[in-house]
Amino acid sequence: MTIIQVKSFVALIADIAIISAVGVVLYSYNHRETPAPTAAALSLGQRLPDLPEVAFASKANTILLYVHSQCQFCTQSMAMYRQLADIVASRKAELQIVAVSREPGDILAGYLGTNGLDIPQVGGIPPGWASLTGTPTLVIADRQGRVVASWVGKLDEPSTRDLESKLEIPEGGLE
C-alpha cells in the first residue's frame, strides 16, 4: 500500500466518523424527551361559547368530552367514557354527554365508533374553542353553559372519585 492510498483510507475513515457523529447529534436532538405542554383545566363559572349542536339549557348538566383520535390517553379513557355514557343514558332526563373535537366529524365518528362509544358528537370545532388545549378534557357544564367542573388528561383515582361526586354517581361506579 502506498502512502497516498493510506492517506486516502485515513481521510475516508475520518469522513465516515464525522458524518456518523453529526447523524447521532441530529437524531438525538430530534428524538429528545420533551415534557408535554401543560394544559389547564377550564375556570369554574366560565361560560362556554355556543355550539348550535349542544343545547345546554335542555339538561341540568352537559358532559363534554374533548378528544382526538391520535390521543393515547383518550383511547385509554374510552372504557370509563363508555361507563359514563351508560350512566348518562339511565339519567337522560337530567344529563347529556357530547364528544367534541377539532377533527372533522367523520373522523370523530369513526374514532368513537371504533372504540364503542355511541354518543352525540360535534366535530370540527374551531381551534381554541372555550380555551380547550389538551386532550382528553372532560367538562361538566350547567344549563347556562357555565363550567361546573373540568379535568384535563386521563383521570387518576382522585379525579375519578371527584367526577363521581359531582355527578352523584356511587363511589366506584366508574373505573
Image: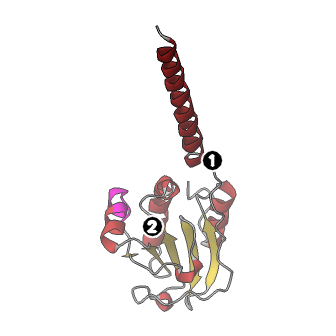
In the depicted view, which residue is nearer to us: 32 or 62? 32
At x 35% / y 73%, what residue is drawn? Answer: 104
> Disc 2 or disc 1, which is closer to the eye?
1
* Mark 2 element type: helix
Element carrying mark 1? loop
Q: Is residue 99 left or right of residue 60?
A: left
- Residue 115 in magenta stretch: yes
Q: Is residue 151 magenta?
A: no
Residue holding disc 1: 33
The front one of 160 and 72 is 72
What residue range appears in magenta?
111-118
Q: Which mark is residue 105?
A: none
For badge 1, the amino acid type reads Glu
Q: Answer few, some or many: residues within 10 Å of disc 2's Cα (few below 14, many 20 plus, some between 14 and 19).
A: many
Residue 106 lies, in percent from the top left, at 30, 70
Q: CA distance from mark 2 to mark 1?
A: 35 Å
Residue count near mark 1 (Cα–Cα under 10 Å), binned few <14, some 14–19, many ≥20: few
| Dots 2, 1 in contact, CB < 8 A | no
Q: Earlier in the sequence, mark 2 or mark 1?
A: 1
Percent x, y of residue 133: 57, 71
The image quadrant where one finds the C terminus is: bottom right
- Name the residue located 49 percent from the left edge and 86 percent from the top edge: 59
Residue located at (55% from left, 89% from top): 143
Residue 72, horizontal then vertical, whole percent: 49, 53
- Residue at the outermost top position: 1
Q: How is the image coloured?
A: secondary structure
Would you identify the image quadrant in which residue 39 lies?
bottom right
Q: Would you identify the image quadrant in which residue 128 lies?
A: bottom right
> Relative to 28, does residue 153 appear above or below in the rendering?
below
Residue 53, how many percent across, how many down? 39, 86
Residue 85 badge: 2
